Amino acid sequence: MSTFSRLAVLMKPIQREMLVGLALAVLASLANFGLLFLSGWLLAAAAVAGLGGIVAQNAFNIFLPAVGVRFFATVRILARYLERVVTHDATLRFIGRVRAWSFERLAPQAPAVLAQQRSGDMLFRFVSDTDRMGQFYLQVMLPFAAAAICCTAYVVITGLFSLPAALVLGVGLLLCGTIIPLITAKLSAHATAQISLQQDMMHADLTEILQGMGEFMFLGAAGSVQKHIADQQANLRLCRQKIFLLEGGARCLSTIIGTLSAVAMLALATHAYHAGTLSAACLPMLALGGLAAFDVVGPLPAAWQLLGPVRVAARRVFAVCDQPPCVPAPAAKASPVQPLDLCFCNLGMHYPEAKHWALRHANLLIRQGEHVALVGPSGSGKSTLINLLFRFYDYQEGTASFGNVDLKNVDADVMAHHVGVVAQDYHLFHGSIRRNLMIACPNATEEKMWRALQIAQLAEFVRAEPAGLDTLIGEEGVRLSGGQARRLAIAQVVLRAPAWIILDEPTEGLDTQTEQELMAALLSALPPQATIMCMTHNPAVAGLMDRVVRVEDGRFHEAGRAP
């Protein structure tokens, strides 16, 4: 299926609004043509009647054409207003549909597939490219369709009075509506492609630069980064200047052709008048009608130029949305049942394109209610457990079950209901402490929030802040210390009260006293049936667990029970 065919499929739900918008656009253009067409005849006919003496003046009925002029003027105003409302509403609906469709297909790819993309480029595709796709109807389809319908009507109406004038009008409209825009689009194709490429790179670079500005300054590379962005901006400016010059030249040439066509139509009408086949009042009517006819082809050069960027944007969005998820959706979804035991049997798993197995011939059994510490060197496979549980990556050998259900049949949303995770690279959202807690549990009361903060040893800090729960923490919790941010992430999981809690280095960045108080409060607050799997390098934390399992060489080795 071609790119534009796929866009047409996405447009189907708003097809009715699009057709109404097209009808209103055609009506407004026809009313504009009719207004000038009839006004030209009315003025000329009134002048002829005035020169014809008292008999001609009395015979001339000015009221009927005057009513027609008012009618066309009123219709033009109303149709143009309604057309703007309907077409922009349809455009916004289409953009919303494209973004919802894109998110629906991008979500299953997170994080495995999306991690291979630059975050700035992904943001640009999801925001700017989808916005450009949304303009396909308003700035490409609508001008072309309205021009095709209206130009045909203009030529037919003109042909009723003068076939030679209609032929001249048709040739002029053909030149301005197809030939000139096609040439302009061809000449600007390279610059348009360069703009798309440069914008992609610049948005991705800007995102990385803003995220790592501190590191660039520490390394003394801020000047080179600034020069790099300035060079990219200069290239963009040159490409845009070329496009603006071409578009301006096309508009200028279209205006000249429109004017020459109107003059030629007037000359042909004058010849027909002298031949006695056309009345004098029709001369300005045809001339003004010819000028009005070219208004509808004015937007076509810009529409032709936008066609390329829309195609590029759609291909970029479709390319990333069409990538298959790293783990396919469960063929037969099932929900885990009590007891929620985790069992790995001869499990083998390696990451895509990785040369070594993350887990190989691994066997593990964690029963519900156990507190288990996973220890081992970095890269030994501890964090791989989280990726397997939430189906971010798939395993290739052996079997894995949770709650007596094969992991391959458990949906990630179902798993999130039973398992809470405090990852080592947790993420806090911009906003208040309350907002971050409500993301974890939207229906949580303030009493439950304070209890979760108390368990996470963060309540004292929050109470000391003037805004309390409404204290702003900044993007990624930048206004909090590393230890405070980690404790807020722990409070999020505690607030949810899942059956399983997975802690990945929960006490990193904490002093010894806070570390002990946090773990003691956490263990005492959890119900007996709650399961804890704690991944840590800290022997003191591991000693608080019931069992210690060492992960090494992709296998699990029982290290005994904690004292």
Image (tube, rainbow, N blue to C red):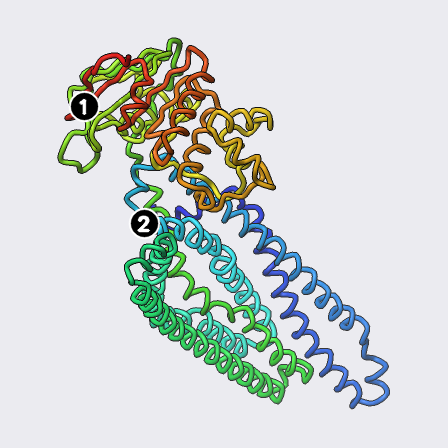
> What kind of residue is marked 2?
Arg
Q: Nearest the camera: 240 or 462?
A: 462
- Position in image of residue 104 (x %, y %): 42, 37
Q: Quadrant of residue 526?
A: top left
240 over 334 or under it: above or below: below
Q: Which mark is residue 118?
A: 2
Q: Nearest the camera: 39 or 140?
A: 140
**Residue extending furthest top?**
339
- Counting residues from the N terminus, which is met first, the one under dot 1 or under dot 2? 2
Q: Which mark is residue 348?
A: 1
Q: Is residue 110 visible?
A: no
Quarter of the image where the N terminus is located: top left
- Position in image of residue 308 (x %, y %): 37, 61
In the visual, does 353 lie left or right of 546? left
- Position in image of residue 387 (x %, y %): 30, 29
435 over 202 or under it: above or below: above
In the visual, does 458 lie left or right of 283? left
**Residue extending furthest front?**
513
Q: Residue at x 28, y 34 (%)?
A: 326
